[in-house]
Image (tube, helix red, strand yellow):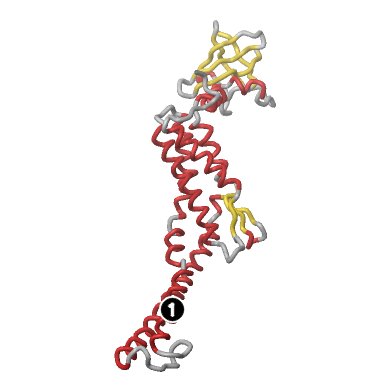
């Protein structure tokens, strides 16, 4: 008799075949006569032993019946998870968002970089931050030496001492004030230490796809979702904050060298939704009451 596999459960090794006579017959994996994996929709040739299908062979050249896929156990389960909870669909959205443009690089002809492709930009900014830190340390040393000399002159002969070798001239007191103003201005424009601090945490963005994958796996296996939903959502919001600061660090004057991509915004919205879902504030609108 001819038919198609309607469904198969690997854990129990049993499944169901719908025959060409429109009747359904159960079967066990032991009756499968092929090395080809058992899957819903495969056309088969089989014999009957009572109400059981035996001696089951896949029909050569026959593919999977696409029309039968919606009724397969895996598809039915995925549909149930997608409409029954927010965790599963949001986890899938986060995984997809991780592959979408997270930032757009103006300096690289508008090149779009995904969350998983930020390495070159982060390395480049880290080198710039390191160079800025070295310059700042050199400036600080120079300021300290000049100030020590001025303080020494003031201590010995007073602030009104005429002096021309420090600053722009005038008295030692005026030169000291100018030096202090110069130091304050230089300090205000420095961001090397803060840049290095933020860039050192950029590895946290990789937690987004890892936690999203964990959340999807937990959903599929029916495990508790509250804590992993909160962790996944929180990591997404943090990652968005890091990306936002990354674009700020890459700004030169009024020209933004990096801009946020739509993948980053999708990640933010999905993260907020996951946090609210984990707290029980929102639920899947498609879920049955």
Residue 276, position as x, y percentages in the image:
46, 34
**Residue depicted at x 47% and y 73%:** 185
**Residue depicted at x 54% and y 50%:** 115
Disc 1: which residue: 139
Mark 1 burial class by Cα count in 10 Å: few <14, some 14-19, many 20+: some
Foreground of the two, 241 or 20: 241
**Across the whole image, how many numbered discs are drawn on residues?**
1
Q: Farthest right residue? A: 61
- Residue 227 visible, this orientation: yes
Q: Quadrant of residue 232?
A: top left
> Element type at marker 1?
helix
Q: Is residue 20 left or right of residue 136?
A: right
Residue 2, position as x, y percentages in the image:
66, 14
Above or below: residue 157 compared with residue 64: below
Above or below: residue 227 compared with residue 39: below
Residue 163, position as x, y percentages in the image:
42, 93
Foreground of the two, 36 or 196: 196
**Residue depicted at x 37% and y 90%:** 160
Q: Is residue 24 left or right of residue 211?
A: right
Q: Farthest top residue? A: 50
Q: Farthest left residue? A: 156
Above or below: residue 176 compared with residue 197: below
**Residue depicted at x 51% and y 36%:** 91
What is the quadrant of the N terminus in the image? top right
Above or below: residue 262 compared with residue 249: above
Foreground of the two, 142 or 74: 142
């Amino acid at each position: 008799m001819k038919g198609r596999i309607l469904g198969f459960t690997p854990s129990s090794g049993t499944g169901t075949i719908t025959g060409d006579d429109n009747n359904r017959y159960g079967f066990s994996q032991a009756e499968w006569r092929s090395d080809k994996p058992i899957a819903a929709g495969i056309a088969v040739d089989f014999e009957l032993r009572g109400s059981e299908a035996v001696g089951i062979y896949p029909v050569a050249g026959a593919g999977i019946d696409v029309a039968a896929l919606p009724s397969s156990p895996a598809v039915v389960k995925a549909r149930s998870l997608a409409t029954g909870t927010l965790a599963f669909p949001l986890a899938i959205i986060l995984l997809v968002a991780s592959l979408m443009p997270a930032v757009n690089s103006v300096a690289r002809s508008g090149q779009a970089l995904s969350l998983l492709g930020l390495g070159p930009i982060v390395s480049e900014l880290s080198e710039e931050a390191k160079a800025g830190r070295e310059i700042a340390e050199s400036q600080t040393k120079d300021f300290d030496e000049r100030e020590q000399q001025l303080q020494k002159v003031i201590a010995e002969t007073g602030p009104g001492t005429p002096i021309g070798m420090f600053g722009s001239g005038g008295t030692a007191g005026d030169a000291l004030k100018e030096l202090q103003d110069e130091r304050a201005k230089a300090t205000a424009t420095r961001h090397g230490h803060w840049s290095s601090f933020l860039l050192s945490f950029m590895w946290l963005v990789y937690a987004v796809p890892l936690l999203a994958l964990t959340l999807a796996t937990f959903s599929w296996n029916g495990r508790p979702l509250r804590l992993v939903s909160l962790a996944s959502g929180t990591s997404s919001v943090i990652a968005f904050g890091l990306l936002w600061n990354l674009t700020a660090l890459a700004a030169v004057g009024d020209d933004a060298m990096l801009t946020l991509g739509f993948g980053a915004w999708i990640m933010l919205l999905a993260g907020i939704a996951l946090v609210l879902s984990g707290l029980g504030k929102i639920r899947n609108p498609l879920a049955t009451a």
